[in-house]
Amino acid sequence: MKGISVVAPVAVALNAASAYASIIPDLSSIEMPNVFKRATSLQSVTVNGNAFYTGNDRFYIRGVDYQPGGSSNATDPIADPSICQRDIAEFQKLKINTVRVYTVDNSADHDSCMQSLANAGIYLALDVNTPKYSINQDSPADSYNAEYLQSIFATIDEFAKYSNTLLFFSGNEDINSVNTTQSAPYVKAVTRDMKQYIGNRKYRSIPVGYSAADVDEVRVATADFFNCGTDDERSDFFAFNDYSWCDPSSFQTSSWQTKVQEFGNYSIPIFLSEYGCTETTRKFEEVATLYSTQMSGVYSGGLVYEYSKEGDATQEKYGLVDLSSGTPSELPDFATLQSAFAGASNPSGNGGARSNGTASTCPTKSSTWLVDSDALPAMPAKASQYFSSGAGKGPGLTGDGSQDAGPGSSGTASAGSGQPTASGTSGSSAASPSSSGKKSAADGRVSDLSFGPMVCGAVVFVSSLAGAMLL
């Protein structure tokens, strides 16, 4: 075998590697998509048409509303591992897959509880508002400001990293009378802003929607309003708090059959964000109907109100457990609900879900709907900085509050202006819808494989060249 000099070929290989490296982007300076950062292991839930899915399987919400301490004592039950782990043991007895939490501390760490929930197969449906940071239904324009949006964006930052964050509620019963319908454009603007923030910050497409009061005069108009307009404005789902089924009742004799007919052509998922009438002894007979084919073509399950006994004599009737001793004591309704859940299987296949619906028609102004137009307020200018820089640390539950923090919106947004933008700047002034059509909130994300092929190509090229020269 002839002797060969390896010095020159190696030098050539090294020079080639150096030259190739010069065209490879410096990945350390690039903000990689947040979609890579997963803190829990459950498969994420997505929306397709009027239903939720995990992969190709239909997902039905089967859960409870969870806020120990109630509204009078705002605490975060999923920031304290000793609390959440205590209660997860009870959730597992019920065999639920979702809990709704109304108030969290967005300055706290939630890794432990979110992982414990994921280990138990439980997703989180989360309200982003807190008592101090929310839209004031009586003065919505003043309370829709940058300080408020910073708080809700910080909540998104905290929970978007968990794969078992099921969805975000942009509001809860802000519209609960004819007079309060005037707040609807501001709550819908918050929905738009949240979707745009999720897209611009390159998170996975987490569903954002509204939890409505079940008020006959405004129920359908509210649902239509949140599902009309351009895709960036529309909710990803619609939920409402429904206590109309009081045992003994049935699908036909309660208002549930009427509501299924009302929403038969609704194009996004609907579910009950609260249910469980206490005007009579609760037998939870509605559970079997909720998860039957009578409703599954329109509804995607629901959340029983509520886990713990709270409040006054009227409020405490809703509790499934008593936590007054620090240890869960199961009340009679717990075993009743446990039995009802056990006896109600999900429908087979897709349960009659539809994937080809269209947006609703916006309701017109009337004696029961006091909204002048379909236009939404533009996002407060100061809040646009968060799209590129992030919201930063949240104010938690001890912040000064935002309802009087001003200034609010300075004008009206153009339809379609809430689409995620690659630059991270606000589109809430005079932008026009894209000529290429409507986009989803996920369209602002950088591709998961944007730089992967380039990096792999560089490695293969240099390795192959060096190997060849050494032969």
Image (tube, rainbow, N blue to C red):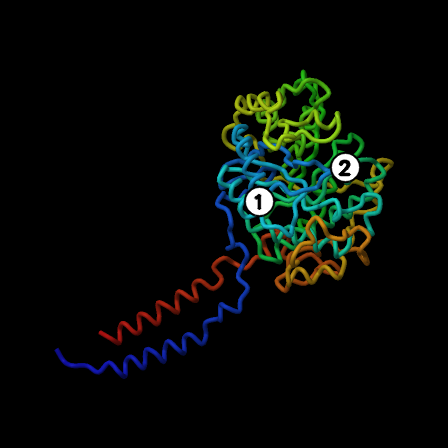
Vertical arrangement, residue 192 with respect to residue 454, above or below: above
- Residue beneath disc 1: 165
Which circle marks residue 141 in the picture? none
Mark 1 Cα-neighbour bin, 10 Å: few <14, some 14–19, many ≥20: many
Identify which residue is drawn at 62% across, 50% down. 108
Give how far across and how far down residue 89 sits, in percent: 53, 33
Q: Is residue 48 visible?
A: yes
SS of the residue under disc 1: strand
Quadrant of the snapshot with the C terminus: bottom left
Does label 2 or label 1 sit earlier along the sequence? 1
> Is 376 left or right of 95, judged from the image as shown?
right
Distance between the alpha carbons at the discs numbered 2 and 1? 28 Å
> Is 469 left or right of 104, judged from the image as shown?
left
Q: Quadrant of residue 114?
A: top right
Mark 2 Cα-neighbour bin, 10 Å: few <14, some 14–19, many ≥20: many
Give how far across and how far down residue 145 sits, in percent: 77, 55
Amino acid on which the number 1 mark rests in the picture: Thr
Identify which residue is drawn at 67% across, 16% down. 248
Give how far across and how far down residue 59 sits, in percent: 54, 36
Give how far across and how far down residue 29 sits, in percent: 53, 69
- Residue beneath disc 2: 221
Q: Closer to the observer: label 2 or label 1?
A: 1
Taking depth in this image into account, of 397 and 57 the one nearest to the observer is 397
Amino acid on which the number 2 mark rests in the picture: Ala
Vertical arrangement, residue 343 with respect to residue 14, above or below: above
Residue contact at pointers 2 and 1, CB within 8 angstroms? no
Q: Is residue 299 visible?
A: no
SS of the residue under disc 2: helix
View extreme (left): residue = 1
View extreme (right): residue = 367
